[in-house]
Image (spheres, rainbow, N blue to C red):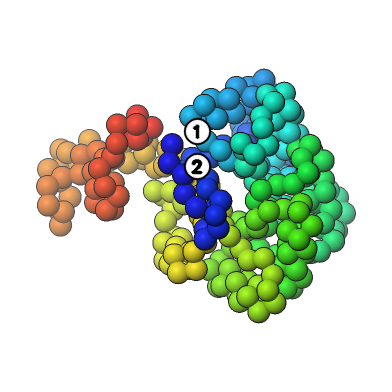
Amino acid sequence: MRYNQLGRTGLFVSEMTIGTMTFGEPGKGYFDKNIAGVLQSQAEELIRIALDAGINLIDTADMYSAGQSESIVGRALRNMKIKRSDILIATKGYIQVGRGPNDRGASRAHILDAVKASLDRLQLDYVDLYQIHGSDPVTPLDETLRVLDDLVSQGLVRYIGVSNWSAWKMAKALGISERYGWARIDSTQSYYSIAGRDIEREIVPLLTEDKIGLLIWGNHAIRASVGAMRKTFAQIRKDGGIHGVEGSIASVEDVFDLQGMGKVKDDEKRFLR
């Protein structure tokens, strides 16, 4: 396993992480029976395999299966007797978790409540990375950043990040944090796959310039595109290639080559199939 710095921090995270969106009973929260369904024993087996492979980061969120995902992760850490310093826990807050008007958003009120509830479910004293799980169009940005800085100062959160934010909003947040000396954004979690590479236009250059870490979600969307591509490959081979492209595109591997993504490794080929 390879480990990289989280942004410009001194924290090292594994290149692969454990996503827990599927942890919890089917039909709970926002997810139907086709997404959730990984229960306690199965989750612990997945975590064991991941830890044995060198993965050191588990990513969850308060709205995954109405909080069950965090509870399952918390019990797993206790049941498996995992040393706290050997694992990094990332969670997220922002999306609706109750029926009240303040059970969502990035306001000071909701984030303080959300972090406390997440820590209770995870059975932890702190989380390593707390992420704002969306862009709040109502709450002033400085209000959100101030409460995150307070959480870092209190030791409840060690690093802060965002998810699904635009480049301009992250840039503005960095400016505000620098102006007031508050904790700054150290990571963003964004959608990225062979089917959706929009972040390459503005977000990735920002991350490179300001040394912000990137966690991706939705990378399995490649599966949705592979089936469609394979249906066309047979016809492409019959036609002798695509006009304007030297040679022919005969496989998914050729798509990687054309996109400048390099040679596909054996393990990636197995995944693509």
* Residue 262 location (% of width, % of height): 26, 47
| Residue 271 picture quarter | top left
User: Which residue in the protein does label 1 denote?
Assistant: 54
Up the image or down, 150 lies above or below 48; here it is below
**SS category of the residue bearing label 2:** strand
Q: Is residue 210 left or right of residue 121?
A: left
The answer for how far apart the CA atoms under marks 2 and 1 are is: 7 Å
Name the amino acid, label 2.
Answer: Ser
Q: Is residue 273 left or right of residue 210?
A: left
State yes or no: discs 2 and 1 in contact (Cβ < 8 Å).
yes
At a point 68% along the width and 53% down the height, the residue shown is: 158
Is residue 65 among the parts visible in the rendering?
no
Q: Which corner quadrant holds the C terminus? A: top left
Q: Is 153 located above or below residue 24 in the figure?
A: below
Q: Can residue 147 be seen? A: yes
Q: Please provide percent x and percent y for residue 48.
A: 58, 25
Image position, residue 243 (x, y; %): 15, 54
Q: Residues within 10 Å of mark 1 (few under 14, many from 20)?
A: some
Q: Which residue matches tag 2?
A: 14
